[in-house]
Amino acid sequence: MQQRPLPVPRRLAASALVALGVSAVSLAATVLVFFVTNGATAANLGPLTTYFLPAAIALLVFLFLAALVGAFRSWWGAALAGLLGGILASIAGTAYTVVSTGTAWSQEVTDYLLGSLAGTSLVFEVAAIVAAVTLGRAIWRAFPAADRGPVAIVRLPSDKLQDGELTHLERTAVDADLAQEQWDAYVSVLEREGFEIVQAEPAEEHPDSVFIEDVVVMFGDVAVITSPGAESREGELEGIRELVESLGQRVEQITRPGTLDGGDVLKVGSTVYVGRGGRTNGEGIRQLRAIVAPLGYTVIAVPIKKALHLKSAVTALPDGTVIGFAKYLESPTVFERFLPVPEAHGAAVVVLGPDAVLLSSAAPKTKTLLEDLGYRVVTVDVSEFEKLEGCVTCLSVRIR
């Protein structure tokens, strides 16, 4: 999973604070446990602190290095850093204590040192793991990645793409090699247009996993992980939480019995249109409304029966005008400003900037229409994905 690192100055500061915080808490927790178990006598505080201080210092150094290389971008990385750091720091601290007394190194000393890992030092090791996963992660995440530009999250097509779900179209042969070429070209366009590309881990066992828009929806710094309407797609959620958290997003999630596909969610300013169709149900819409209402968004449910997703039928231009293929809609009047387009594949655009959009090359008439409105239109061939009811929006998740 490709994750965005902190810039060097912020990484150094974050690493130092993570290491200092986790080692200090680990030391304090360990001393407190032994202080209480030894009768809570004030005279014990000094010797206990002195005994565990070398291990805490060693832990600080280890965690600083671990944080520098990105261990705290994920919870499991933090847990591993806490585990290894706790063990190595305990060994170093115990070894220092033994050596500082002038004791000659021997097999007996080695046995004592190793035995202490499951004895005297065990509390310190456990404290290091818990503090790393909780406090360490919290400190790391408190540092924003940067004043970054737009990000596009993408996922490689599965070799099983041909077997993707179909609802409204007849199945036709998908050229896997051509699909890969088209995906590469699509990603290249986004990169040329200023998007930083972040790749989610491939999900080879899931044919539809390339349509990553369906599994997570962004609302500012909040990422809503969806509950796919097709049960075959539930496995695509794996790893998405860790990925979006690494990008600085706060995570919310739709849960069963609610279902929600990201392709059904169209944001126009503070209004969120949600398609109520085959993949998104009323409970999913209710949960989304409860999540985004406190963020200042208004959710409007839109019946959709003739297309797989709402955004297969309508999307929005940079100025907020909703464009769509009228034959796919039950009631275009639900949108405040609606502009019909002449081709089905012209209903979906990705906003590239205030005056530019990305459009399927299968919609030349729509391209002319949008250019006549003053937009720069970039086209890309996504024919192999359109055979599976995909479009230009569903191949990426954009964070601006």
Image (spheres, rainbow, N blue to C red):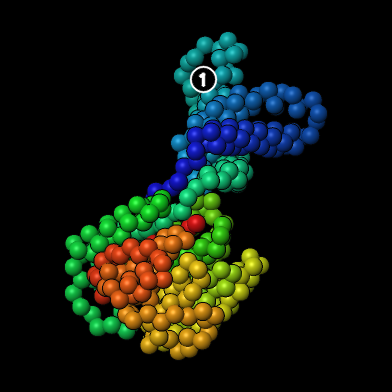
| Quarter assignment of residue 127 | top right
Of 168 and 48, nearer the camera is: 168
Q: Within 10 angstroms of label 1, few (less than 14), some, or many (20 or more) residues? A: some
At horizontal 54% and vertical 21% (from top left) the residue drawn is: 95
Q: Residue 241: horizontal and vertical position, in percent?
A: 49, 58
Q: Which residue is the extreme one toward the right? A: 42
Q: Nearer the viewer, residue 313 or 163?
A: 313
Task: Classify mark 1: helix, strand or loop.
Answer: helix
Residue 229 appears in the figure: no
Q: Where's residue 385, x and y in %?
A: 28, 70
- Viewer-nearest residue: 90 or 151: 151
Dot 1 corresponds to which residue? Answer: 109
Q: Is residue 176 above or below residue 256?
A: above
Q: Is residue 337 left or right of residue 170?
A: right
Compared to residue 305, the image places residue 298 above or below, namely above
Quarter of image, res 393: bottom left
Q: Give the amino acid type for the residue marked by disc 1 in the picture.
A: Val
- Residue drawn at the location 52% of the way across and 76% of the way down: 273
Residue 272: image x %, image y %?
Answer: 55, 73
* Left or right, residue 47 beside residue 183: right
* Residue 22 shows in this picture: yes
Looking at the image, is 183 positioned above or below residue 99?
below
**Residue at x-position 54% and y-position 80%:** 336
Give the residue at x 28% y 73%.
364
**Is 157 left or right of 18, judged from the image as shown?**
left
Location of residue 236 in the rendering, given as x and y in whole percent from the top left corner: 39, 64
